Image (cartoon, rainbow, N blue to C red):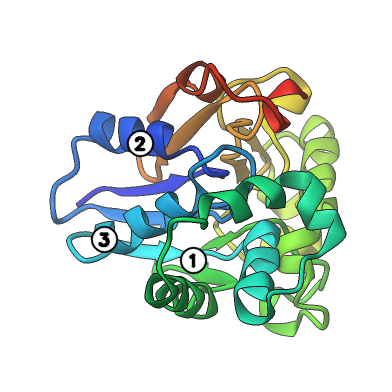
Amino acid sequence: MRSFAIGDIHGGLKALKQLIERLKLTNDDHLIFMGDYVDGWSESAQVIQYVIELSKTNDCIFIKGNHDVWCEQWLRTGDINEVWFIHGGKETIESYEMISEDDKKQHLYFFEDMDLCHIDNQNRLFLHAGFTSMNGVEREVHKENFYFDRTLWEMALTMDKRIEKHSELYPNRLKHYHEIYIGHTPTTNLKQDQPMNAINVWNVDTGAAFKGKLSAIDLDTKEVFQSDAVYILYPNEVGRNKQ
């Protein structure tokens, strides 16, 4: 059995399908999606429908990202968060124009059932963004940090240069887990188009929302699989891919 962490999709259904094809999945493979399924490219609703169907044949865990929180709120109330609207929400709303009310309800239930974080039997932690409690995710007071925090990744990048791989010197936040997998902050911000590792933190968001690719990483071998650059798959679209 293989286990993969899959980075932020942001409405790029074509990239997701391409990535899944390149993984050559078997029914024994395990998929952990790191959040932000929606917002950016034109097929957010279709991404949600696709992963719902995928979960019927494969073992999947779905982590909730900040964009998913915004979309869930809109599906529940119809209210449009202005920050969300200008950061991909507009494209997501448009993708739902041909979606039935029954399917919208199914998508809402799907968002509501997502995990904010997950710890596997090898003490690997998965969450969209980060956490701030020195005592680990179980003691996190502000759950919004799970899908908004960037300080965990920033700290890992800073400390990685200072202490190399000496686990006894890790900051307390990182000592609780064998490995930590996140998305949220594109590695392309650092001019890297592959998942990045700093200390025991792995960032799998390789900028699919912008000029990057959609990535998956084998948790055991660390082999990386990627789609083509997502903007190439949507040549007639503008928006977040301009950034």
Q: Which residue is mark 2?
A: 221
Residue at x 41% of width, y 25% of height: 227
Camera-nearest label, 3 or 1: 3
Q: Residue sitting at 40 percent across and 45 percent down? A: 219
Q: Residues within 10 Å of mark 1 (few under 14, many from 20)?
A: few
Q: Secondary structure at mark 3?
A: helix
Which residue shows up at 56% across the image and 32% down it? 195
Q: Which residue in the protein does label 3 denote?
A: 53
Q: Residues within 10 Å of mark 2 (few under 14, many from 20)?
A: few
Residue 131 appears left or right of 228: right
Q: Is residue 99 left or right of residue 95?
A: left
Q: Mark 3: give few (<14), some (14-19) or many (20+) Cα within 10 Å.
A: few
Query: What residue type is disc 1 on?
Result: Asn
Mark sitting earlier along the chain (3/1): 3
- Which of marks 3 and 2 precedes in the sequence? 3
Give the residue number, with chain letter if any, for mark 1.
123
Q: Residue at x 19, y 43 (%)?
A: 25
